[in-house]
Image (tube, rainbow, N blue to C red):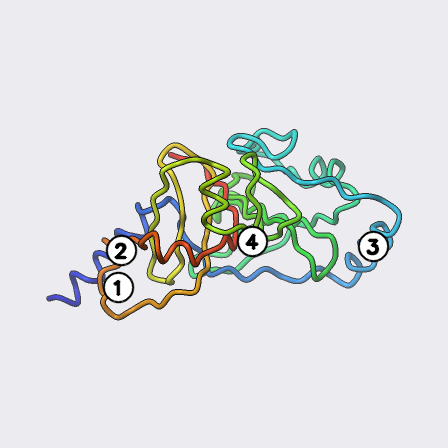
Amino acid sequence: MKQILFYIFLIGLISCSTNSQDKKVVYKKPTEESQIETKTVGQTKDYREIVISENSLDTFSIPFPEKNMLMPLKNYYKPYWLEANIGQQDGPDFTYIGILKDEDNSIAYLNFEPDNKFKLDEIRIVSSSAIDQYGVRVGDTYQEVREKRNNDFKNSTNYHQHTYLYTDSSNIYYELTGDYTMTEEMLGNLVELELTEEQLQNCKVEYIIWRKRK
């Protein structure tokens, strides 16, 4: 009986803790053709800084209109290389658009709903080359995030042991990585788990994530 209740708590955490709907995602590498083109263009042009805001990605309102956005994004973000591909996760495969400088330097992934390849699900910033409207970058410490945003944050950890820092009023939140130990007691009560300030002080931003609040 205890085991059944534990699994029910885990399912509840996934569906409502931070709207993260965490994915164990596998993104494909760029093709050889895209790698060559990216390197060639990158030698002659400057890259603009990508900025994610509560309701926009640079000049694009988000979520996007439900149509194929690859070419408008591709034209705007030159000389970055953009490509549409299929990502894999625990659930159904999904379409995404990757923004890359080269094959080893991904900047962001624009992930779409599995059942609608034109409906934006989330944007995941994976590089410090991009920035959010609050001045937060990948690699910033928890303390730097607090200073830049001046918010009272909440945090939660899911069954993949991924920890998220968020507020109830923002579309932008942060996946954290840190030097702290997950004890058996913590793992046994993920529904109520909240990291302490002391534990958060050892964390930094691994990803910046945009997801429209319901």
The residue at which mark 2 appears reads as 193
Label 1 secondary element: helix
Cα distance in 3D space between marks 3 and 2? 47 Å
Residue at mark 1: 186
Q: Which of pointers 4 and 3 lies earlier in the amino acid sequence?
A: 3
The amino acid type, in three-letter code, at marker 2 is Leu
Residue 42 point in image, percent of width and height: 83, 51
CB within 8 Å, label 2 to label 1: yes
- Three-letter code for the amino acid on which mark 1 is drawn: Met
Say what amino acid the circle numbered 3 marks: Glu
Whole-angstrom CA distance, mark 4 to mark 1, is 25 Å
Residue 82 vs residue 94: left or right? right
Is 51 above or below relative to 207? above
Counting residues from the start of the chain, the first of labels 3 and 2 encountered is 3
Rendered image: mark on residue 37: 3
Q: Residue furthest bottom?
A: 184
